[in-house]
């Protein structure tokens, strides 16, 4: 099976599952926004349908990345995921659908946390994730980073301030480093990621405040192999809610090495917000609002057939932001030159009942998976994990 990337319809929020083409079908979950309520799709059920179970019958992901601790990127963590020591997993006796999901490794950025919590109070799920990250770092320190088990593993995305992560080099990914390990296993050929942000702690409080106000987020550009023979399948860039100044800075830094920002698939930052492309207010200035050329350039390094996905509610021609119609038009213009496409998760197959949107990774980027592929895949997983019943 090819590698696959699935976007779940979570309104204005993010929830993405990257499934590698290796024999383990390694799964990397990026952000969650699992809402309750009758008008919300049951994305927890959708996600569970795509996960396998371990030897103890626990659903699991190999890695979970939180790009930044806003509620639309971490909602549902405490309800649906196991937090705490692996030995304390409490749900082994529960029915299938109620077992919390086990995160073998988590990817977390203390600097992003610091910036977000200085801006606004954190929600309970965000606090819980931070607490879990601290627990895992402590386990790593106690074990001197050797023999750390699944469920205790963590990768730190970006150095923290004041040397706080200096002793964590074996679990630290620095900005501009590439890495191929997922859950301590080298996935080179199937997965190589470069950490582009959070930009490091700034020299002045003024500069630091600007980054805080621009929704500092983990930004990764992942190269995902299509299959065992095609390591250069697609480049997939995700950047949480990072806004205009951050993309400006990234362009300043990488404009002479543009391949760092190149993509076949881009998750439009901040749910297709105008604020990732411009310093002007869309609702106040409408068509007079100006695009920032550097931020736009950073988000325009497309490969042939590049696709931009907005993880948002349906995009309307109105004052709203995000999602913003003008940002959509800008992304459409960006991909037009390379015969690409723009899709909004909240509109597929229709606005009333959006469904998870899955892309197959091919040798030339990505292609929307045929609708019948997804359920078939779930059936295959179910068949491999349930005990066959005897003929009646
Ligand atoms: Zn968001």
Image (cartoon, grey):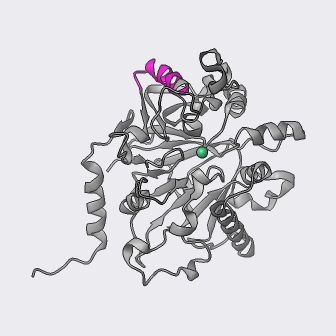
Residue at left 45%, top 58%?
Answer: 26
Q: Magenta includes 329?
A: yes
Q: Residue furthest right?
A: 204
Left or right of residue 378, residue 346 in this image: right
Question: Where residue 35 appears, x then y in whole percent?
Answer: 50, 57
Which stretch is magenta? 327-340
Question: Where residue 196 appears, x then y in whole percent?
Answer: 66, 40
Q: Where is residue 240, by image quadrant?
A: top right
Left or right of residue 128, residue 360 in this image: left
Q: Residue furthest bottom?
A: 93
Regarding residue 103, the answer to whether it shows in the image is: no
Question: Where residue 392 appears, x then y in whole percent?
Answer: 9, 82
Left or right of residue 390, residue 117 in this image: right
Q: Where is residue 47, by image quadrant?
A: bottom left
| 392 or 38: nearer the viewer | 38
- Give the number of callouts: 0
| 234 or 353: nearer the viewer | 353
Q: Relative to 358, is 108 above or below?
A: below
Left or right of residue 358, residue 270 in this image: right
Prevailing secondary structure of the magenta residues: helix
């Amino acid at each position: 099976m090819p590698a696959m990337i699935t976007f779940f319809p979570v309104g204005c929020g993010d929830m993405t599952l990257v499934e590698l083409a290796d024999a383990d079908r390694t799964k990397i979950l990026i952000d969650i926004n699992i809402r309750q309520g009758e008008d919300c799709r049951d994305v927890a059920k959708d996600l569970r349908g795509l996960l396998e179970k371990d030897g103890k019958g626990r659903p699991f992901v190999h890695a979970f990345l939180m790009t930044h601790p806003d509620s639309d990127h971490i909602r549902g963590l405490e309800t649906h995921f196991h937090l705490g020591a692996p030995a304390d997993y409490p749900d082994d006796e529960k029915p299938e659908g109620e077992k919390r999901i086990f995160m073998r490794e988590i990817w977390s950025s203390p600097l992003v946390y610091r910036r977000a919590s200085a801006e606004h109070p954190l929600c309970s799920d965000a606090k819980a994730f931070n607490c879990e990250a601290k627990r895992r770092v402590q386990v790593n320190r106690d074990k001197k980073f050797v023999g750390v088990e699944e469920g205790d593993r963590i990768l730190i995305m970006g150095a923290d301030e004041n040397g706080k992560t200096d002793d964590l080099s074996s679990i630290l990914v620095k900005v501009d480093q590439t890495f191929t390990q997922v859950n301590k296993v080298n996935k080179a050929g199937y997965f190589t990621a470069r950490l582009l942000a959070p930009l490091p702690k700034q020299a002045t409080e003024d500069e630091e405040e600007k980054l805080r106000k621009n929704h500092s987020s983990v930004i990764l550009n992942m190269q995902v192999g299509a299959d065992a023979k095609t390591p250069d399948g697609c480049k997939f860039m995700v950047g949480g809610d990072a806004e205009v100044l951050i993309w400006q800075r990234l362009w300043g830094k990488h404009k002479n090495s543009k391949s760092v920002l190149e993509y076949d698939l881009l998750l439009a930052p901040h749910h297709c917000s105008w604020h990732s492309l411009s310093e002007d207010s869309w609702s106040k200035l409408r068509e007079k609002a100006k695009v920032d050329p550097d931020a736009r350039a950073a988000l325009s390094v497309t490969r042939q057939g590049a696709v931009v996905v907005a993880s948002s509610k349906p995009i309307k021609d109105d004052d709203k932001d995000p999602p913003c119609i003008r940002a959509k038009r800008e992304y459409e213009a960006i991909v037009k030159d390379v015969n690409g496409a723009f899709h909004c998760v909240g509109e597929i197959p229709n606005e009333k009942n959006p469904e998870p949107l899955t892309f197959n990774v091919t040798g030339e980027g990505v292609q929307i998976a045929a609708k019948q592929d997804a359920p078939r895949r779930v059936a295959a997983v179910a068949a491999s994990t349930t005990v066959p019943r005897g003929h009646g």
